[in-house]
Image (cartoon, grey):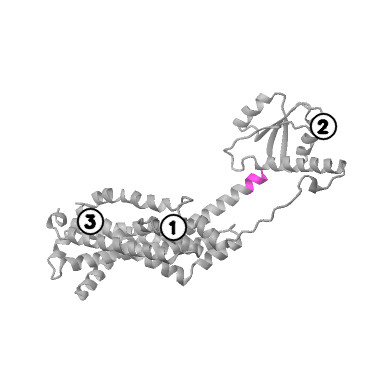
Amino acid sequence: MFKNIFTIIRKEILDTLRDKRTIVTMVLVPVLVFPLIFIASSSVQKSVMEKEQAKTIKIGIVNEDTDKALEDFLRQQENVEIIILDNENQLEELVKNDSIIYGLHIPAGFAQSIESMEQMALNLYFSGTRITGKDRIDRFIETWEDQVVAQRLQDQQLSQTFIKPFVTKSFNVASDQEMIGKLAGGFLPYLFIIFCFTGAMYPAIDLFTGEKERRTLETLLTAPVSRIEILIGKMTVIALTGLISAMLALLGLFVGLQISAGLPDFIMTVVMGILSLSFIVYLLIMLIPLSIFFAGMLIPLAIYAKNFKEAQSIVTPLTFIVIIPAALGLIPGIEYNAATALIPILNITLATKEIIAGTVFIPHYLITVVSLIALAAVSVLFCANWFGKESNVLR
């Protein structure tokens, strides 16, 4: 029996490797997509931010006060062009039209209100759709405000502690690894779950629907091997391609992080430290039954379909069934406990977050693994029953 299964596995692997779509989906996309995304996004982001910061900003000012202190202060800042306007109503319109970046209305008596320690509002107009928002002018105004406060303290012969009587020292008891695991760790399983599914999808369609189209499935069924041996051989290859695709996606992600620029050193240290033997073992123990479960979902649909096009239209909606529980793990507040450890796909997302953070609770992890193995077993039994019916195979 095992000899026949290995023969079928070898045959199906060769057939799979001849399919260009499978190679692209299983190998090229997972390995290249993240390095390319990181390289492109980091370079574009860096270029855009540098241009934005170096760009001369136009500030429209309607100054109804006789004092020009704030206006003069803004004129002294680098890369700032001041445009004096007469009417406050113009500010909103000019900002909308991108004629100016910010609009500032200084009301009459503003300087006097500062001297008399009365509070008066500055009206600032900006567009929230811009990349930097109002960060630059906020920094200018805050700097000027600090100078005003410092002068007040000096005039009153008061120290800085008069307005800031105490300081708060914060101590974060969570390690960098815990922070990354809890806050960003859900993104990692979301990616490899999707690639595990898509990596198994095309081989499933090709090894069943494709063989029906090529009229080779009937020939294989007449060979001196049992149907269960044929199913196990094909299912093994499909699960293996999904597993390889997921692991290559992880590899591509870590390569992309290494070559990307701009990430803090402590993040890179933690990220590279995550790629340890224990992490890979924890992950593989979950990914193996998951890939079998995905194969068990895909095979009956691939058997049922009459041609490749029909198979794609039937299988594609399953992607959303996979994405939704994986995405739920990204929502803050969803904790990894005995209940969530039983929910398929969501449990992998939550378990991976805990593994990355180094806070995985082994009983919950074992519940996840056992539930995944049970799902994989049920999917294999269902596939065996489905593949055993002539009406499904020869439809």
Residue 17 drawn at (x, y percent): 30, 65
Say whether disc 1 or disc 3 marks the residue closer to the N-terminus: 3
Mark 1, mark 3: which one is toward the viewer? 1
Q: CA distance from mark 1 to mark 2?
A: 57 Å
Question: According to the image, label 1 marks what residue?
Answer: 336
Residue 219 drawn at (x, y percent): 14, 64
Badge 3 amino acid = Pro
Badge 1 amino acid = Tyr
Mark 2, mark 3: which one is toward the viewer? 2
Q: Main secondary structure of the magenta part?
A: helix
How packed is label 3: few (under 14 Cα within 10 Å), some, or many (20 or more)? Answer: many
Q: Residue 241, can we see it?
A: no
Question: According to the image, label 3 marks what residue?
Answer: 300
**Quarter occupied by residue 230:** bottom left
Q: CA distance from mark 1 to mark 3?
A: 32 Å
Q: CA distance from mark 2 to mark 3?
A: 80 Å
For the magenta stretch, what is the residue range? 50-55
Membership of 51 in magenta stretch: yes
Say whether disc 1 or disc 2 marks the residue closer to the N-terminus: 2
Res. 237 mark:
none
Q: Are marks 2 and 3 in contact (CB under 8 Å)?
A: no
**Quarter occupied by residue 361:** bottom left
